[in-house]
Image (tube, rainbow, N blue to C red):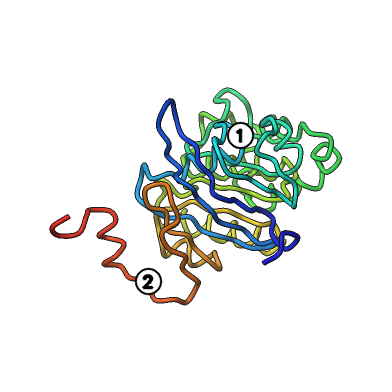
Amino acid sequence: MSQNTNALEITNLRAGYDDSNVLLGMSLHVGSTECVGLFGPNGHGKTTLLNTISRVIRPRTGSIRFMGEVIDRLAPQNIVARGLIHVPQGNRLFPDMQIMETLELAAYTRRAQHELKTNLDYVLNLFPRLAERRRQQCKTLSGGERQMLSIGVGLMCAPRMLMLDEPTLGLSPKLKDELAEAIAEISSRGIPLLLVEQDIAFILSLAGRMYLVDHGEVSREINRGAEVDHREIMDMYFGSEGA
């Protein structure tokens, strides 16, 4: 696949904390309109990868290319300005701000300001609960509503690509289904997505491909419709007999 058909290309990426590497030569790509899933045991590098792409963590070796441009030396704010938006795990919202204040504040780049009204209408239509509660403070929202708002914040940044880190963490099955519909709608607009999740069924309902991450590397690529070896997945989590 040539560079101009990919939104994101990661090549031989190494990164970590202090003197330890968490990513051990990771390589993957996301097509220009593709939704790709990222799955694997906790602590094996999924969140570290997203933090490295968005330059919260500095890469040690390898390259990160977004829309054909090498971005691994850019400052985080410049990556956001280019439209590569990371929605982190854990609903990191300002608790005392209202929903509308939070959404409007997110549109701080020049391109996002230009698209503010269009994107705000889209977010409130996508998540009607946010429209109903637009004057509520973030701290009064349920976990599902906070997650909707977090994704809404990402959309207000006028994304050319979204990275979502475990958006369904701690949500009920009903709210998971609602969020899956919203993510499918975002994907249908042609916005490329990199989706980190623990729920294989959730990922495969949305993504055309899924990467399995094991000890800082991609160990397997799974296409939608392929038979998933659940025994292999369980072995990765708990260790195979005799290991």
- As drawn, the residue found furthest toward the right would be 114
- As drawn, the residue found furthest toward the left would be 242
Residue occupying the point 40% across, 52% down: 172
Whether the residues at callouts 2 and 1 have beta carbons within 8 Å, the answer is: no
- Estimate the x, y position of residue 92 in percent, counting from the top left: 53, 31
Amino acid type, residue under disc 1 in the picture: Arg
Residue occupying the point 51% across, 31% down: 140
Left or right of 172? Residue 138 is right
Residue occupying the point 64% across, 63% down: 34
In the rendered image, which quarter contains the C terminus?
bottom left
- As drawn, the residue found furthest toward the top would be 96
Amino acid type, residue under disc 2 in the picture: Val
Foreground pick, 239 / 176: 239
Left or right of 67? Residue 230 is left
Foreground pick, 4 / 235: 4
* Residue under numbered circle 1: 55
In the rendered image, which quarter contains the N terminus?
bottom right
The circle on residue 228 is 2
| Badge 2: residue crowd in 10 Å (few <14, some 14–19, many ≥20) | few
Foreground pick, 168 / 138: 168
Q: At numbered mark 2, what does the secondary structure look like: helix, strand or loop?
A: loop
User: Which badge, 2 or 1, comes first in the chain's sequence?
Assistant: 1
Residue 227 lies, with reference to residue 98, above or below; the image says below
Instruction: Examine the image and state in which quarter residue 56 appears.
Output: top right
- Estimate the x, y position of residue 41 in percent, counting from the top left: 35, 50
Q: At numbered mark 1, what does the secondary structure look like: helix, strand or loop?
A: loop
